[in-house]
Structure formats: C-alpha cells, structure tokens
Image: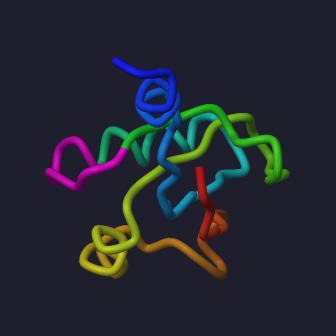
Amino acid sequence: MTENKRDHIRKRIKKDYIIITFKTTTAAMAMENRCLKKGIPGRLIPLPGGIAAGCGLCFRMLPEEYAKWEKELGCGEGSGTEVYHYVM
C-alpha cells in the first residue's frame, strides 16, 4: 500500500450530529434510559469542548433521527435541555 493510500485511510470522516445538553447528570441519564426503552437511536457522550452546558454529558444522535423523534424527545425551550447541530 502506498503512503498516500495509508494517509487517506487514517483520516477520520467528520459527521453532522445533533447534541442535546442537560442541566444535570440525572436528566442526561434519564434521557438515555427513555431512549433505550423506546428504541430511539443515540448515545450519551462527554460534552464536546465547543459547547458549554450544566453537566458534562450530552446525548448525541444523527440529524435525521432527531427529526423523526423530535416530538417524542420533548427537547428545547422550557424542557431544561438545549439542542445543537455539531460536526464531529
């Protein structure tokens, strides 16, 4: 394999994600449990450095999944969560 091909393979492809932040760790864990029970795809991850929120955890999911489950998740204004579009 040539050097050029190795470099291409090593490059990480960045994706768009929806990041949902929480005021408390308890709220983040409750979201994860609710999503697991309802089959909503996503995962709890450490908060990315470019986002400031109440606790150090956030729920990450793909934008198309968020669009599908948005009402079920109940995120946004008045819910104690904030929703961000983030590239990682």
Residue 86, by quadrant, is bottom right
- The residue sitting at 40% across, 56% down in the picture is 61
Q: Is 52 on the left or on the right of 63, as rendered?
A: right
Q: Is 32 on the left or on the right of 72, as rendered?
A: right
The magenta span reads 35-42
The quarter of the image holding the N terminus is top left
Q: x, y percentage for residue 76?
A: 59, 77
- The residue sitting at 57% across, 58% down in the picture is 19
Residue 47 lies within the magenta run:
no
Q: x, y percentage for residue 50?
A: 82, 51
- Residue at the front extreme? 2
- The residue sitting at 75% across, 39% down in the picture is 55
Compare residues 9 and 46 and report the one nearer the observer: 9
Q: x, y percentage for residue 4?
A: 50, 31
Q: Is 49 on the left or on the right of 82, as rendered?
A: right
Q: How many marks?
A: 0
Colouring convention used in this rendered image of the protein = rainbow
Vertical placement of residue 77 versus 85, above or below: below
Vertical placement of residue 75 versus 31, above or below: below
Q: x, y percentage for residue 41?
A: 25, 51
- The residue sitting at 80% across, 53% down in the picture is 51
